[in-house]
Image (tube, grey):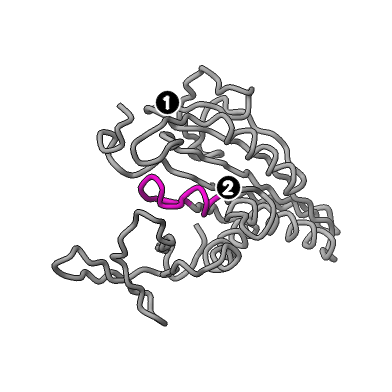
Amino acid sequence: TCPMASAVKVAIRVRPLDGTDTSCVVTHSNTNQISISNGRSDELFTFDNVLDERIKQHMIYSLIGEDIVEGCLEGYNGTIFAYGQTGSGKTYTMSGPSTEGDERGLTPRAFEHLFSKMRRLEEECIDGRLEYLCKASFMEIYNENILDLLVSKKPSGINHCIREDLKRGVYVEHLHEESCDTAAACNRLLQKGLECRQTAETQMNNQSSRSHAVFCLHIESRHTSTEGLVNTRRARLNLIDLAGSERQKSTGSG
């Protein structure tokens, strides 16, 4: 975790209304507070960031993603995840409708930022040689099973186990990792895995994901000084799209 004022920051994003919604949320300008009405009274909540329905995807990344990616480049683990009910905009916020264009989400923007900054740091190193290595893994957590989304067109039937050791920390055993040297390579892996996620038609969303998707980038930097001394730093960037937070029986998915 990065040594910031708080290791955990929470932002709330208000989705624009569609034709069936009723407005019950009021954001307070120039504050980090939001009011929610239940028809009888208002409740006031405070967050690190309050993002109203007018905010653009690039502003979301600037407020939430930039510092976390910068921390990973300094050797600190970082995690970004979206939590909320089905249809609240989690996948749109994390991935966007595509990995290109102004509506691309936090995840493709994190890839762009990460690789652009790594290449620049490598080029600007003047006291020896700096090299970054990056590997990606993508897993799905569904019905308490961990499935590998990168092994084939369909998720592996193997239920991978969680392990822990002093060197790697907490990790998933036998999870496939692929080397990545560009943001485009990461986007291809992201799309490959998203096509394999477990989905089900529900009363709340015609194609609602019933699983958690965890895309992890393993970042390693090796700095070799002019004297030949090698300093290695490792970090993980976890980018997570959670399943809908509602109870299963409320979705009608069985």
Q: Is residue 150 above or below residue 239?
A: above
Nearer to the camera, 139 or 218? 139
- Residue 66 magenta-highlighted: no
Residue at coordinates 19% horizontally, 63% vertically from top-left? 38
- Residue at mark 1: 145
- What number of labels is visible? 2
Spot occupied by residue 201 in the image (x, y as percentages of width and height): 41, 31
Q: Amino acid at mark 2?
A: Arg
Mark 1 element type = strand
Q: Report the Cα–Cα distance between label 2 and label 1.
A: 22 Å
Residue 86, magenta (yes or no): yes
Q: Give the residue pinned by disc 2.
A: 236
Front residue (pair 234, 203)? 203
Badge 1: residue crowd in 10 Å (few <14, some 14–19, many ≥20): few
The reply, left or right, for residue 199 in relation to residue 224 is left
Q: Which residues are magenta?
A: 81-95
Query: Is residue 110 shown left or right of residue 221?
Result: left
Q: Position of residue 103 (x, y in %)?
A: 61, 57
The quadrant holding residue 60 is: bottom right
Q: Amino acid at mark 1?
A: Asn
Residue 91 lies left or right of residue 37; in this view the side is right
